[in-house]
Image (cartoon, rainbow, N blue to C red):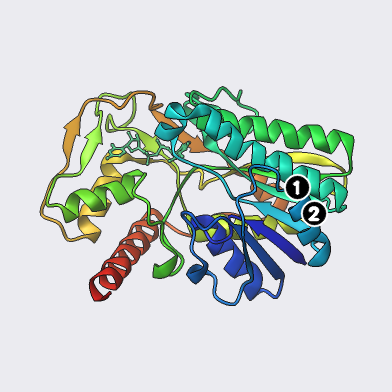
Amino acid sequence: MRVLVTGGAGYIGAHTSRLLAARGDYVLVVDDLVTGSADRIPGIPVVTLNIANGSAEQLESLMREHRIDAVIHFAAQKQVGESVAKPAWYYEQNVGSVAQLLLAMERASVHKLVFSSSAAVYGEASGIITEEASANPINPYGATKLVAEQLISACARSWPLRAASLRYFNVGGAGVPELGDTQALNLIPICFEQIAAHKSPLIFGDDYDTADGTCVRDYVHVSDVADAHLAVLDVLPSEPGNEVLNIGTGIGTSVRDMVDAILEVTASELSAEVRERRAGDPAAVVGAVDRMRELTGWSARYSVADIVESAWASRQYFEARAASS
Ligand code: UFG
């Protein structure tokens, strides 16, 4: 298959681009290289472009020139806090890019799309969440993902678009050290930062209605997430539509258990400190993953220990690289 990957030099995008190339697919990456880096995907052509505004014509030409069969769309902004501060910019970036892409795809007759959505669309839903759960995002980031899904569904009613929107749960780890997430936005990298600064990792709230009182999340290895894109691409339905699929493990891990795993892997003698609840955190968010398994046969292979160990190895790789430069 000949696949255009937007955001293909980013964290999940680079893992996926490499897997596609390794199995013999032709890959063309379009990435603005602001948080992504072309070093992550050696040998894969990269067009440097932010597609949020006025890119449809250029994307259409690229699709024609490279005889693209399918698009995987990762390029997006992903910081919840920033989306609250800059909502219009988040809509421009995360919805605008999808609009430009769909205009180009329709004109170039590219009819297959896999879209990076997020469990953030579920908002404060708690427990084991199926795709039927109502989508009520509680921040602009989640809202932009939901609106983009709706736009894709609307296009699939208008022209023969065969799409899937993958709602990722808590993605972590690294397939190889150089592909780790270099932004400290989530629990695992934030704990690493704390430990590196000889400060205790913080647990935001231990009075939730969960087994140990701390929040429960569904952590899924980035290599599994990347693999899920290939699995979905291969089985996109023959009928137009937008298949919504949870991408997680179906297994919940508490913040306390995750912090303990982090302290062990980092051989730290620090211990966790409990702080106030963080605003807007649902108690438990775990993905029901049956639909994805039934449709594609895919299921996650990596454990929480694999996620933490590979994330730590990646952090050490980047530290060593920074120290030697
Ligand atoms: N947490 C701590 N201490 C920290 C950092 C986080 O206790 O130092 C807790 C949070 O309160 C939360 C859990 O760890 O209970 C996970 O927090 P993250 O920020 O890592 O992840 P979230 O579950 O809040 O958010 C993730 C993605 C978002 C996405 C959301 C949707 O990061 O992009 O899932 O499910 F929107």
Which residue sits at x=17%, y=42%?
272
Residue depicted at 59% across the width and 62% down the height:
16
* x then y, percent, for residue 166: 63, 44
What x and y, as percent, mark residue 23?
A: 67, 74
117 relative position to 295: left or right: left
Q: How many labels does the image show?
A: 2
**Badge 1 amino acid:** Ala
Mark 1 and mark 2 residues within 8 Å of each other at the beta carbon: yes
SS of the residue at dot 1? Answer: helix
Q: Name the residue under label 1.
A: 56
Mark 2 secondary-structure assignment = helix
Describe residue 80's horizontal placement relative to residue 189 as left or right. Answer: right
- Taking the image as shown, residue 187 lies to the left or right of residue 111, namely left
Which image quarter is the C terminus in? Answer: bottom left
Image position of 171 (left or right of 266)? right
Look at mark 2 in the image and give the residue it sits on.
60
Question: Hey, what amino acid is under mark 2?
Answer: Glu
Q: Which of 52 and 261 is in front in this view?
A: 52
Local crowd size for mark 2, using a 10 Å CA cut-off: few (<14), some (14–19), many (≥20) = many
Give the quadrant of ligand 1: top left
